[in-house]
Amino acid sequence: MNNPNEFLSLPVLPGCEVEKYYNLEFKSTDEIHHIQEKLFMDHLKYCGENSPFYQNIFKTHCIDWQSLTTLDDITKIPLTEKDSLSEKNSKFISVDASEIVDVCLTSATTVSEPTPVLLTRNDLSRLAYNEQVSLSATGLQKDETVIIAASIDRCFMAGLAYYLGCIKNGNKVIRAGASSSAQLWQLIKLVKPETVIGVPSLLNRCGEDALKRGEDPGQSSIKRFIGIGEPLRDKTLQALPIAQQLENLWQAKTYSTYASTEMATAFCECRYQQGGHLRPELMIVEIVNGNGLPVPPGETGEVVVTPLGVNGMPLLRYRTGDLSFLVDKPCRCGRNTIRLGPVLGRKKQMLKIKGTTTFPNILLNALQGINGIAGGFVEAHLNSDGTDRVMLYAAVENSAIEITPVREKVQAVARVLPEIKTVTVKEFENKTRVPDKRKRVTFFDLRHTT
Ligand SMILES: [Zn+2]
């Protein structure tokens, strides 16, 4: 460094490039389309000039990226598979190694090894901006105190993103982590936060444990929960039992947010709680069917994303493996952007019970709100005829619990009936708490292990 003062003049986190389009979501749909098209062209040019992976894709598929001129042309680009990102990881790196400032790892839910996702300074700024606009859509004001009950270490992107976004928003941020509901309760009493960001089941346990000790979570300072990692809404965007339970217990509102390390962009609900809004300056979203073709709003398919303005490892039409649907009805908040429904399941976790498709999530959601059931997990095996054999294990607090009402509830909610078995809460804890896994493991797919 020639000038020793040069470093001091660099802001730690300058604004990112797309920040000038702040509030684009409130503009007309025509204007949103126009800006998204421009941003898509910029992104395509960036990939065409800098990404070895996409340069190879364009060459192999005889695509002249310079001839693509509209947003609709995006469908001419092949989908990017999760396996490609993991197997050809270094080919996605589109900057000089000296520009990388952070290394994140994916949470490895589908491949055995976590995949590195490298971030530049601009990518970190983009991540902060993304969370700032997402979290503030829930009504989060500057100067409020936020507890992050999620991991911020071990190369996880999510906790870091919430932290940066809240700091950028002007909040006081408490990094509580996700390990202990007792510690979370202590912190809530100590710092009196208005908002908690965390996994719904942890927040629920924290409230229930407080109640058992004779304390009332409804009287606490909390007025907003931003739920991560587990769904809060059903297919019709109505509150799932866990969301109702949280709102009653804490006298607070729940908001759902969905993102992944690869997309580095969140879909977050606004104060009307009707699906996660897309930030049009940050991402293009498509839903595709089994043949990889886009489907219209309302139809379920795989979520495919093109995060805009990413420099380190840019992606085009990345398959998330998550299944959901788009909502294009106007939202009362005035944002004119498309919304994403809840994640209904993972494509690889799709189960068939007597010909009807379902997902582990849907079966586990059906157990929510049943008295005396602390949770559950699902095991899938293969029958000798090649069909799925699905077992739903319910963790019972008391072995005398009647199984018939459980069966009836599962059939009514999930519209299929797997085999249902009971386990003790201890057995449930031992089975689902897997060392080094950030989230509780509740699906064991044993269909292709032999
Ligand atoms: Zn809205």
Image: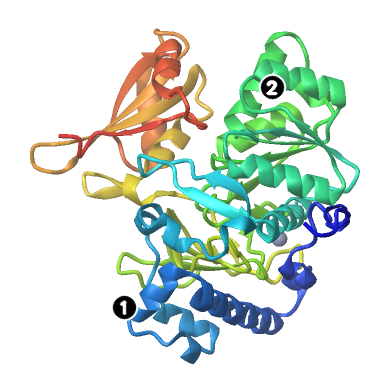
Query: Outermost residue, right direction?
Result: 143
Q: Position of residue 117 (x, y in %)?
A: 52, 51
Above or below, 201 relative to 325: above
Give amino acid for label 1. Thr
Quadrant of the drawing holding the N terminus: bottom right
Q: Is residue 265 visible?
A: no
Percent coordinates x, y for residue 217 in the rendering: 76, 22
- Please provide percent x and percent y for residue 275: 61, 56
The kind of residue tagged 2 is Gly
Report the disc number at residue 23. Answer: none
Q: Is residue 265 above or below residue 45?
A: above
Residue 344: image location, x then y, percent: 45, 49
Helix, strand or loop at label 1? It is helix
Whichever of callouts 1 and 2 sits on the residue coming sooner in the sequence is: 1
- Look at the image and name its color scheme: rainbow
Residue located at (37% from left, 58% from top): 88
Residue 60 — which label? 1
Helix, strand or loop at label 2? It is helix
What numbered label is drawn on residue 207? 2
Q: Nearer the viewer, residue 11 or 7?
A: 7
3D distance between C-alphas at marks 1 and 2 = 55 Å
Q: Residues within 10 Å of mark 2 (few under 14, many from 20)?
A: many
Label 2 CB sits under 8 Å from any ligand 1 atom: no
Decide if residue 150 is in sight here.
yes
Tell me which corner region of the image, top left, top right, bottom left or bottom right, holds residue 302. Answer: bottom left
Q: Residue at the spot x=47%, y=30% of the render?
A: 437
Q: Nearer the viewer, mark 1 or mark 2?
A: 1
Q: Assess mark 1: CB under 8 A from ligand 1?
A: no
> Which quarter of the frame holds ligand 1?
bottom right
Tell me which corner region of the image, top left, top right, bottom left or bottom right, holds residue 166: top right
Residue at 53% from the left image edge and 53% from the top image edge: 236
